Image (cartoon, grey):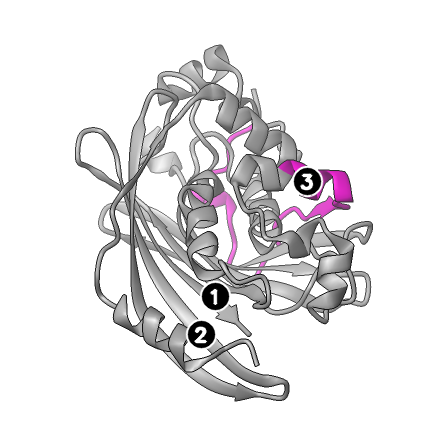
Amino acid sequence: MEKQLYYEDVAEESRITRLVKQPTTTQLVMWAGASGDYNAIHYDKDYALKRGLPGVIVHGQLAGAFLGQMLTDWAGDKGNLKKLSLSYKGMNFPGEILICKGKIVKKYFEDNQYLITLKIWVENPRSEKTLTGMAVINLPSKNDI
Amino acid sequence: MSIDSELIKELEGRVGIAEKPLFYEIEKGMIKRFTRAVGDTNPLWQDEKYAGKAGYGGIIAPPNFILILGFGKVLQNLIENPEVTVLHGSTELERHKEIKPGDVISVTNTIRNVRERQGSTGKMLFVTIDMLYENQNQEIVAECRQMTIIY
């Protein structure tokens, strides 16, 4: 069993555990199959070049799922991701290292829930934020144990 | 240019009209393919016993899983024309309930608005789509707004 994170363990302005990914072209094909997103810019280099892109690009929602994994890894089994917003700012390319990061913006008690608002983002090897977003997570409280 | 007035007219004609719902029967295999593609090994998504003990009654789908339901279809509807590029702009998801194997999720898509902008290489369209996800008990499990960019 993993150790559960509690509302009381979290401090505003602190960073959460980062997640490092390096998607391969094989992974993009796996994602296309799993997600049903067959937009050819993600697996057909000739088509991607013809459409003016530098090559095949990582699906935005795959990078978004990396951020989702970072959040659920961090929040533990009893954490609940309630809201997730993602803004696809730049392209990610297979083979490149992507670092998922997050920072706690606010913690508050509302509608009988202990909530955490986080800023989240994906950074490429040039420290560019290619995907930015926000998340709201409901954490358990030690008051309820 | 690939974005012609006909496409714009066609998309604008669909604004505010809910499309026929799509139905997805959630199977363990779907969740497995998703988590493998992501490289996410959290036992909540694959170990019945573990997830049961954690209080979910069995495995659940990861939060981002719902975003794949119906989205491929959204893209297909937008890019029947291979001379058009579709990129993803943004996603706003609100979750209300967990999804489990055995659930039947209906997805109802509605184009909310179509905005036209002049880009450096021609016309660009920003198309916002609202997606409503309900389970077999008519409970809303999630709501999402997807924005796509077409040029």
- The reply to whether residue B20 is in sight is yes
Which residue sits at x=56%, y=68%? B84
Left or right side of A122 for B52: left
Circles 1 and 2: CB distance less than 8 Å? yes
Query: What whole-number distance in Å separates the C-alpha atoms at marks 1 and 2?
Result: 6 Å
Query: Mark on residue B126?
Result: 2
Q: Quadrant of residue A7?
A: top left
Where does residue A123 sit, x and y in percent of width and height? Answer: 71, 61
| Tag 2: amino acid | Phe
Circles 3 and 1: CB distance less than 8 Å? no
Residue situated in front as seen by the camera: A60 or B13: B13
The residue where tag 3 is placed is A29
Query: Mark on residue B148?
Result: 1
Circle 2 chain: B
- Of pointers 1 and 2, the one earlier in the residue sequence: 2
Query: How dense is the environment of label 1, judged by Cα within 10 Å: few (below 14), some, or many (20 and up)?
Result: many
Circle 3 chain: A
The segment highlighted magenta reads A3-30
Secondary structure under the numbered disc 3 in the rendered image: helix
| Tag 1: amino acid | Thr
Q: Is residue A4 above or below residue B117?
A: above
Where does residue A6 sit, x and y in percent of width and height? Answer: 46, 39
Query: How dense is the environment of label 3, judged by Cα within 10 Å: few (below 14), some, or many (20 and up)?
Result: some
Which residue sits at x=60%, y=42%? A32
| Tag 3: amino acid | Val
Secondary structure under the numbered disc 1 in the rendered image: strand
Circle 1 chain: B
For the residues tagged 3 and 2, is the chain the same?
A: no
Which residue sits at x=64%, y=53%? A40
Q: Quadrant of residue B15?
A: bottom left
Where does residue A80 sit, x and y in percent of width and height? Answer: 40, 40
